[in-house]
Image (spheres, helix red, strand yellow):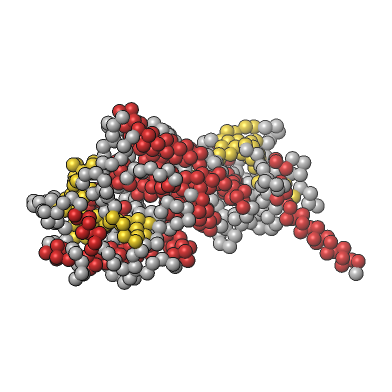
């Protein structure tokens, strides 16, 4: 991937912290329970400022989990959370769904990369397209797979119905 | 009253990188591209300028002898001379107004009404024209999409500073008189004193112009058929300085504000001068427009407090007062000051708003049709669905910089690429 500093081994928390501190001065770091950490701060995609929180466990290979805190995620007027594009959907509290910023199968992120150079930049980009989506319901940011959970679930139902029909014959 | 830089910057204060506006700057540049004259418009205007001289010198012209016996110059003045002409104020109109100057020595025995009377007669029968109106200081040629104000300038006696002279103020009621004038010198002063952009910026603006011109052509097909000869232009080239773009935005904003008021509006040339004297703003087009509006507001507040002025003169010819007929009342001053407050408030709102609300602000300030076309253009430029684009963002804030070439220098310096990736989607209900 062009421009990204891949490391031989997973990046240590110190390196991640230093980079976020250097490049994202409006973010603060916090150690949470266990090995979980959080960066929280102001970012904008277009003009509007948002507060986002980036959760990450440096002792696991999990990707960072990014949520919108202020203002929180909101559907289009008259729409549902499921229709919001590109989320790691959290059904119980959809407003706390994470932003799905890369394709895991495309190996676009690993813990050998810096959160400051990847996750944070992608979040800014997501925010701009999210604002444009709010204007007319069109996601112009591209992506792979279904655009939203609503679309994914509809496709699953369609597949199931097709399968049932086939079984019945 | 002297206006200090500190006073100009006092509202609003742009303090840090957190207050840059790369997204809004980008949209405002699109607004400029929508409201300015297209290359096609300029060609049409150019051809009509070119026709003035042969028409006024035709055998049946009442001015033929005068023009042939004296050295006569006919040239663009006003906004056309500095490339700051915009399309008309009305939302559904593409009309634009240009100015021409007939620079010729008039006979000493002519009264101060005679020059415009003679010009009015001589302009009769101008090709394709729909209506000719004699105004107080000019004769106006009207076509469906274009008006041309033709003014006569009687040159000063030798030794004459370049193109200095007097124009004629000749109202229906009241006394006629001569007004010292040097629009040519003003145009030169303007071009010399604005801050010019980089070549990259010019290329980006040119590319936007091309795309808008394509979009605009269908609505312009009905445009009057001026002779479309490919000749060297007589209209001076555009000036693509940031201060000129701010001037175009200001003119558009005020056109819409004054359109429904039915009162005399401040002269464009007054704003043209202030667009330069407010100074260049390195933080981008939004900040430039704010700086410009703040300067006007300060001028109006000072004039209101003094119940006098402002008295803005032509820097190329100090005896010429640029706003000699405006303002006439305190209400004029107050209204313009309030307009500037409303503009500054609108821009401040747009600085902090999401795109949907930014577009609403742009509709309010520059018209709904303009803001719609602006958003369409922006959408096309950032659309990743059919073509991958490498976006940049402002380090530290995350703000996406839609085009680094047109970003403020401070923003462009901190631009960093967004690494390639694909947005994805995951369902916690998935098996």
Residue A19: tell me if it is visible.
no
Give how far across and how far down residue B297 sits, in percent. Answer: 37, 35
Front in this rendered view, residue B157 or B396: B157
Specify whether A157 is left or right of B414.
right
Tell me if B402 is positioned left or right of B244 in this view.
right
Q: Is residue B156 among the parts visible in the rendering?
A: yes
Name above or below for residue B67 compared with residue A35.
Answer: below
Q: Position of residue B180 (x, y in %)?
A: 19, 46
- From the viewer's perspective, is residue B301 above or below residue B351? above
Q: Residue at x 87, y 67 (%)?
A: A166
Check the image and name the residue furthest to the left. B159
Q: Quadrant of residue B306?
A: top left
Asked if A138 appears above or below A90 in the picture, the reply is: below
* Residue name at image x 33 percent, y 34 percent: B329
Residue nearer the viewer, B269 or B327: B327
Residue A53 picture location, percent across and down: 63, 38
Res A116 quadrant in image: top right
Image coordinates for residue B1, horizontal then vertical, percent: 27, 31
- The count of marks equals 0
Residue found at x 79% / y 58%: A156
């Amino acid at each position: 991937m062009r421009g990204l500093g891949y490391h031989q081994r997973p990046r240590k928390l110190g390196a991640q912290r230093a980079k976020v501190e250097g490049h994202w001065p409006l973010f603060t770091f916090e150690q949470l329970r266990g090995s979980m950490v959080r960066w929280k701060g102001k970012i904008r995609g277009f003009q509007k400022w948002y507060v986002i929180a980036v959760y990450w466990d440096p002792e696991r290979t999990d990707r960072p989990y990014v949520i919108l805190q202020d203002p929180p995620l909101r559907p289009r007027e008259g729409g549902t959370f499921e229709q919001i594009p590109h989320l790691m959907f959290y059904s119980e509290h959809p407003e706390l769904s994470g932003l799905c910023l890369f394709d895991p199968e495309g190996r676009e992120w690993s813990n050998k990369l810096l959160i400051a150079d990847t996750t944070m930049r992608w979040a800014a980009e997501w925010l701009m397209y999210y604002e444009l989506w709010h204007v007319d319901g069109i996601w112009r940011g591209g992506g792979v797979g279904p655009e939203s959970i609503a679309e994914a679930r509809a496709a699953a139902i369609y597949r199931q119905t097709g399968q049932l029909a086939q079984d019945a014959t | 009253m002297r206006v200090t830089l500190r006073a100009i910057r006092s509202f609003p204060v742009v303090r840090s990188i957190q207050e840059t506006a790369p997204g809004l700057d980008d949209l405002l540049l699109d607004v400029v591209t929508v409201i300015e004259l297209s290359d096609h418009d300029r060609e049409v205007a150019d051809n009509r300028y070119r026709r003035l001289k042969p028409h006024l010198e035709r055998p049946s012209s009442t001015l033929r002898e005068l023009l042939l016996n004296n050295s006569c110059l006919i040239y663009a003045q006003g906004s056309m001379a500095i490339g700051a002409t915009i399309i008309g104020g009305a939302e559904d109109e593409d009309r634009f107004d240009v100015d021409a100057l007939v620079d010729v020595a008039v006979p000493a025995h002519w009264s101060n009404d005679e020059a415009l009377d003679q010009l009015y007669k001589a302009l009769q029968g101008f090709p394709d024209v729909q209506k000719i109106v004699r105004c107080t200081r000019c004769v106006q040629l009207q076509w469906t999409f274009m008006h041309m104000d033709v003014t006569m300038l009687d040159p000063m006696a030798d030794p004459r500073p370049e193109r200095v002279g007097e124009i004629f103020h000749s109202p229906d009621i009241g006394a006629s008189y001569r007004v010292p004038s040097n629009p040519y010198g003003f145009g030169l002063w303007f071009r010399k004193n604005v801050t010019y952009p980089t070549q990259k910026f010019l290329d980006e603006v040119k590319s936007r112009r091309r795309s808008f011109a394509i979009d605009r052509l269908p609505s312009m097909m009905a445009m009057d058929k001026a002779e479309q000869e490919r000749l060297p232009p007589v209209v001076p080239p555009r000036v693509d300085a940031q201060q000129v773009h701010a001037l175009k935005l200001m003119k558009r904003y005020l056109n819409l504000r004054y359109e429904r008021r039915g009162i005399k509006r401040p002269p464009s040339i007054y704003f043209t001068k202030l667009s330069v004297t407010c100074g260049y703003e390195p933080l981008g087009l939004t900040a430039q427009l704010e700086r410009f509006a703040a300067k006007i507001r300060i001028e109006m507040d000072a004039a209101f407090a003094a119940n006098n002025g402002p008295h803005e003169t032509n820097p190329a010819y100090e005896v010429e007062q640029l706003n000699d007929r405006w303002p006439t009342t305190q209400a004029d001053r107050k209204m313009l000051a309030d307009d500037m407050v409303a503009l500054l408030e609108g821009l401040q709102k747009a600085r902090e708003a999401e795109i949907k609300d930014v577009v609403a602000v742009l509709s309010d300030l520059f018209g709904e049709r303009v803001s719609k076309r602006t958003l369409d253009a922006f959408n096309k430029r950032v659309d990743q669905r059919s073509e991958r684009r490498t976006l940049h963002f402002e380090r530290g804030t995350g703000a996406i910089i839609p085009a680094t070439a047109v970003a403020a220098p401070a923003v462009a310096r901190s631009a960093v690429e967004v690494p390639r990736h694909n947005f994805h989607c995951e369902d916690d209900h998935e098996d």
